[in-house]
Amino acid sequence: MASPVRRPGSGEGMDAPPIGTGDDSQVPARDWSELPLDALASVFVKLGAIEILMGAGLVCRSWLHAAKLPDLWRSVDMARHKVVDDIFDIFGVSPVEPKINCDVLCAMARVAVDRSRGQLEVFVAKRFVTDQLLEYIGDRSPALKAVVLVSCCGVSNQGFTQLVARCPLLEDLMLVFCPKIGGRDVYEATGRACPQLKRFRLKKRAFCFSAGKSGGEVLGFAAMHELRTLALAGSAVTNDELASVLDGCPRLESAPGLSRWCFLPFVSRLMMRTTSTKLSAPVMSTSAATPTERCDP
C-alpha cells in the first residue's frame, strides 16, 4: 500500500490522499456529438465543402445533421483543396486520394447543391466540372450570384450558356484557363441572360494585342450593360473594340490588365469617365456611404 504524502505547510494531522491508489477523481470524457447545432455550424462554415463531405460530416449522426444545414452551402468552394490540385487532366485521379476522381468530385458537388436547398449563391470549382454538372447546378440554384471556373476543360460553350440562362441573378463571373468557353456570341448571350452582371474576369493562356484585327469576341462584353469591372488576359483585342465596350457598358469603372501603353486611348477614356463620375456624384455623409466594391483579377 502506498504511503501517505504530506503536503508542504499542512498541519501535522493533515495527510494528503495516497498517490496511485485510484482514489483521485477522473476527468470525464467529453462527448463531442452533443455539441449544439449552432456551435457545430459555426465550426463547419470555416471548412471547405470537400472537408465537410469527406470528413466532418461523417463523424457521427449529429455532425451529419449539422453538415446538412442549408446555410452552410450558400457558398461552395471546391477549388482550394489538395485533392483537386493533384488531379491530373490525363488520368482524372488524385495521387493523394486514389479513390477520388473527377466523377466522385462531381457527385460531391451535386450533394452540396442538394444540401443548399436552392440557396446556393457562390460556386467555385477547378478542373473537374462538366456540362452535366453545370446543368444540375442551374436547375437547382435560382439564387446563384457568383461562379468561378478554373481549368475546366470539360465545360463547353453550350454548358456555360445553359447555366447563365438559368441564373439571371448572376453578378460575378470568372473563367480561368477554360479553353472551350469563349466567343462573341457566348458573351452577348451572357449579357442578355444576366442583366445584373457587374464583374467579368477572363484569363486565357497568353495575352494578345492586335493593332488592327482580332477575333471580335471582346465585342460581346458590350452587351453587359451593368458591368463595373472587366479583367481580360489572353484575349485578342483592339482599341476600337475596347471603345465599343465602353460605349456599351456606361458603368464600367475598372479594367485590370488593360492599363498598358497599347490601350492608351481606352485607358484615357476610362479614367475620364471615372473622374467625371466622382466629380458629379453628390456629397454624402459618412454614415450613408457604402464601401466601394473591389474585385481583384
Image (tube, rainbow, N blue to C red):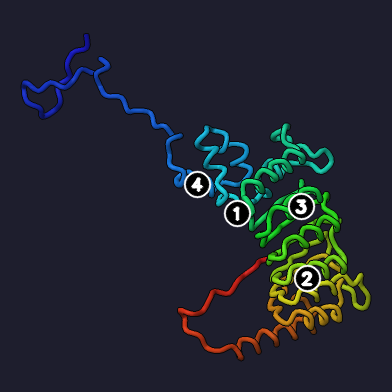
- Which circle's residue, 4 or 1, is located before the other in the chain? 4
Residue 25: x and y in percent read 27, 24
In terms of secondary structure, where does tag 3 sit?
Answer: helix
Residue under label 3, please give it: 134
- Where residue 16 is drawn, which disc sits there? none
Residue 4: x and y in percent read 17, 16
Residue 284 is left or right of residue 86, and the answer is: left
- Where residue 41 is drawn, which disc sits there? 4
Residue under label 1, please give it: 74
Q: Residue at x 85, y 58 (%)?
A: 157
Q: What is the count of numbered marks? A: 4
Separation of disc 4 and disc 2 at Cα? 36 Å
- Which circle's residue, 4 or 2, is located before the other in the chain? 4
- Which circle's residue, 2 or 3, is located before the other in the chain? 3
User: For the residue marked with disc 1, what is the amino acid?
Assistant: Arg
User: For the residue marked with disc 3, what is the amino acid?
Assistant: Leu
Q: Residue at x 82, y 82 (%)?
A: 243
Q: Quadrant of the C terminus?
A: bottom right
Separation of disc 2 and disc 3 at Cα? 18 Å
Among the 4 quarters of the image, the one containing residue 296: bottom right
Residue under label 2, please give it: 191
Separation of disc 1 and disc 3 at Cα? 16 Å
